[in-house]
Amino acid sequence: MELLKPELGLIIWTTIILLSLIFILTKFAWKPILKGLNDREKTIAEALNTAEKTKLEMAAMKSQHEALLNEARQERSLILKEAKDMKDAIIGEARDKAKSEGAKMIEEAKREIDNQKMAAIIEVKNAAGNLVLEVSEKILRRELNSKDEQVKYINTLIEQSKLN
Amino acid sequence: MCEYLCATKKRVIALKVLKFKLFITIFLLSVFSVSLVSAAHGEEETNSTAPTEHNESKKEDGKFNAKKVILEHISDSHEWHFFSYPTGDGYKDVALPLPCILYNDVNGFSFFLFNKLHHGAIDGYSLNAEHHIGRSDGEGFYDLSITKNVFAMMISSILLIWLFRSAAKGYGARPNQAPTGLQNLMEVLVSFVRDEAAKPFLGKKTDKYLPYLLTVFFFIWINNMLGLLPGGANVTGNIAVTTTLALFTFILILTGSRKHYWMHILNPPGIPFGVKLILVPVEILGIITKPFALLIRLFANMTAGHLIVLSFLSMIFIFGQMSPIAGGGISIFSIAFSTFIYLLEMLVCALQAYIFTMLSSVFISEAIAGGHDHDEHAAEDLP
């Protein structure tokens, strides 16, 4: 049957076409495509590796960071405590000082008041003495008619002085 | 609820319309083919007394010869025949004449276009009764013409080169980035061949044979597919083409073969002498039968597919000659079945390309296997 007889011409042409196709496609298509595929696969694998590594690094950094943070936190609380202590001490001191100062001032005030009081009493005493002297003078200057009148007069004087 | 029902109803109606359209299409096609058949029938009767040289041989005896038509469709030719139409005094062929390159000891090389032979003999070459090139002096000659199959192979090769060249450009333009468009499509196919047909068998030797395997895969596939087009050349269903493809694999098997491969054939280890007497000849035969199976498989699969489609379509014309109504009736089934086979063939196209490629790589890997000293050679192969 004709269908089953391979023709020599067609075999030769097929060989020529196939050989040139293999050559051209290898040079212009397969090499760049396969190289591109391999390169990309490599790049992806590398990227994945890098990502994994970065993840580990990140984890390490995170723990480091955490430790640092903890330290900082401790330090902060320490500082806060110190500050509080200092504040308490300062306030206590200030209070003590204020208290003693206040006591001192009160003491001084009291003394002043006493002084003033004494001065006032002396003044009153002086004024009373003067008044007595004045009254006595007036009494002495007046004629003393009767005893009643004297008494009366003395009373008015006293009354007057009182009114004053 | 009502909306849903209405939508469903609409869909049902749309489906019915679609079915109706399909039916009408098939019906119209049938009527068209029947009218063609009857036109041809009438034409022949007027022409039967004076057949011209341009007449198609299939109608010469007034009957539709399915075998001849089918064989003409699947065999190689010196012209690319598209269709023929009836004219006043016979049939006119619309065909692309292809260049003939012939060699003979007397004339040396002769170059001419095939249609020149219609007007008379050139350099002693003329058309014989079967519309083929022959010599009037009966001497032998070599036919190195660019036939329909050669021309189709050239077209498909150019198509392949263009396709993969443009796909490969993407790697230069966007290195290490996601592929786009055509590059994306081709990359899937290339990596499929690499990962499914080459790497599992060839291992570290993959890079050496991959260009050949890729070329063969895409060459077979594209020629299979182009052969399915109406008017397409049946390239991969031609035994000369498949023989050449198998020869390529055979040469790669022989050039790549190691001592281990030949020792397994000539002196299989661990087998008693009596069995060896039977086994060794079988194994020696196996050297040839493996590539032979490759060439027969591809040839038979592609030819069978074309045969079935053409047979179904020929049925329309065979029945149409009995009566136009019978032809019209059978055309509905013929078209439905040939459409089914056509779709199946599209799968077979890819499948056969894959099988040829995969088996090639299996046979090559058997030949290059190092056996016990495999590791030693493997170490050698490392860059």
Image (cartoon, rainbow, N blue to C red):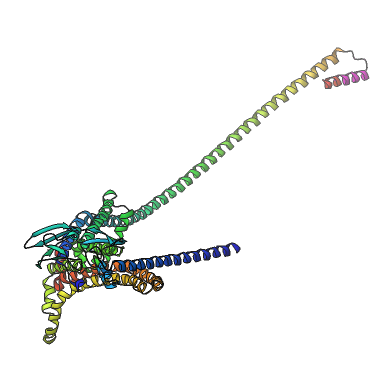
The C terminus of chain B sits in image quarter: bottom left
- Choose top left, top right, bottom left or bottom right for residue B330: bottom left
Depth order, front residue of A151/B173: B173
From the viewer's perspective, tell me whether residue A111 is left or right of residue B358. right
Q: Is residue B293 above or below residue B178?
A: below
In this rendering, the count of numbered labels is 0
Q: Is residue B103 above or below residue A145?
A: below
- Choose top left, top right, bottom left or bottom right for residue A113: top right
Q: Position of residue B74 (x, y in %)?
A: 25, 68
A152 inside magenta stretch: yes
Depth order, front residue of B154/A124: B154
From the viewer's perspective, tell me whether residue A91 is left or right of residue B157. right
Q: Does residue B92 appear in the picture of this structure?
A: yes
Depth order, front residue of A118/A36: A36
Q: Does residue B200 appear in the picture of this structure?
A: no
The N terminus of chain B sits in image quarter: bottom right
Outermost residue, left direction? B106
Main SS of residues in magenta: helix
- Choose top left, top right, bottom left or bottom right for residue B355: bottom left
Q: Position of residue B324 (x, y in %)?
A: 39, 71
In the image, the segment drawn in magenta is: A143-157
Q: Position of residue B186 (x, y in %)?
A: 29, 58
